[in-house]
Amino acid sequence: MPLRETLLNLAITAVLVLIVVLVGIVVKEGRPGPMAAVPVKVAGIPGLTVADEGGVPRVATVEFEIFVRTQLIESRANEADTLRIRVGDDEHIFVLYFVDALEASMNHPQRVAEQGRWFGKAADRTIIETGVEAAAFVAELLKNRRFKVITRWEHVPNTVRYYALILVELQPERYVYLADLLMQKGYARVQGVTTELPADKRDMPSYLAELQGLGRQAREARAGIWAKVAK
């Protein structure tokens, strides 16, 4: 084969090899690599967020806000005094002012034991069973009656939950605080964070005295937990 023809073939081969290499590089660069984890924004306070609390975090306000477009949402977090509620277009978990309702699980054994001592030395099992009963009572009530949520977005410590007052419509345009109903049924004790009552003639000491009175009546009537402990 003439030298000229040999050199031409070598040049063509070199060009083809170069083209193959360049194509390989382009394909490699264009191929997607392993997908990086995409951070998901979770509603809450940095360092204090609890999974599945829901809602966009709110800043505490001086004035109360009253929500009438409300709906109880089924949640594992729900108890008689701790409720996931849709207000407008958002969902939040609210905890009642003034009262501590019976625990519905052993998630907080120390609190269960404390409630047992307070409610006539009730056994843990009795506390939990009655707490489940109380939670069912509240769920049925709020599913079938209109209710208002009144809050100023005061945070429950170390959570993205908020304290609130809940008013339940028992009769047309006659609203009663859910805290009152829990005390009447023997499902709660007066305990926890207190607040002034917006648009209410009663001051805080007067309302606390009324709640204590409802608790005594429930005990005398053997309502709720009081029916399950010794006199």
Image (cartoon, rainbow, N blue to C red):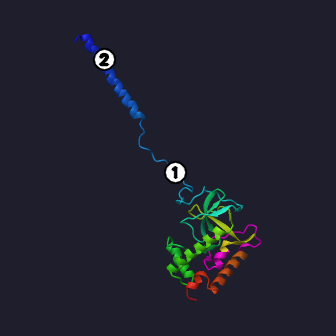
The outermost residue toward the bottom is 231
Q: Residue at x 76, y 67 (%)?
A: 199
Q: Residue at x 70, y 78 (%)?
A: 210
- Kindly report the distance in space between the C-alpha atoms of the residues bearing marks 1 and 2: 55 Å
The amino acid on which the numbered mark 2 sits, given as a three-letter code, is Ala
Q: Residue at x 65, y 66 (%)?
A: 164
42 versus 224 height, above or below: above
* Labels 1, 2: front one: 2
Q: Secondary structure at mark 1?
A: loop
Which of the numbered marks, if any, corresponds to residue 40?
Answer: 1
Number of marks: 2
Q: For the C terminus, which image quadrant?
A: bottom right
The amino acid on which the numbered mark 1 sits, given as a three-letter code, is Val
Q: Which residue is mark 2?
A: 11
Label the magenta part by its dominant secondary structure: loop
Residue 19, given in percent of the width and then of the height, sits at 36, 24
Residue 6, given in percent of the width and then of the height, sits at 25, 14
Is 188 magenta? The answer is yes
Q: Residue at x 30, y 17 (%)?
A: 11
Residue 207, given in percent of the width and then of the height, sits at 71, 75
Q: Secondary structure at mark 2?
A: helix
Instruction: Magenta stretch: give its range.
Output: 180-204
Residue 196 appears left or right of 49: right
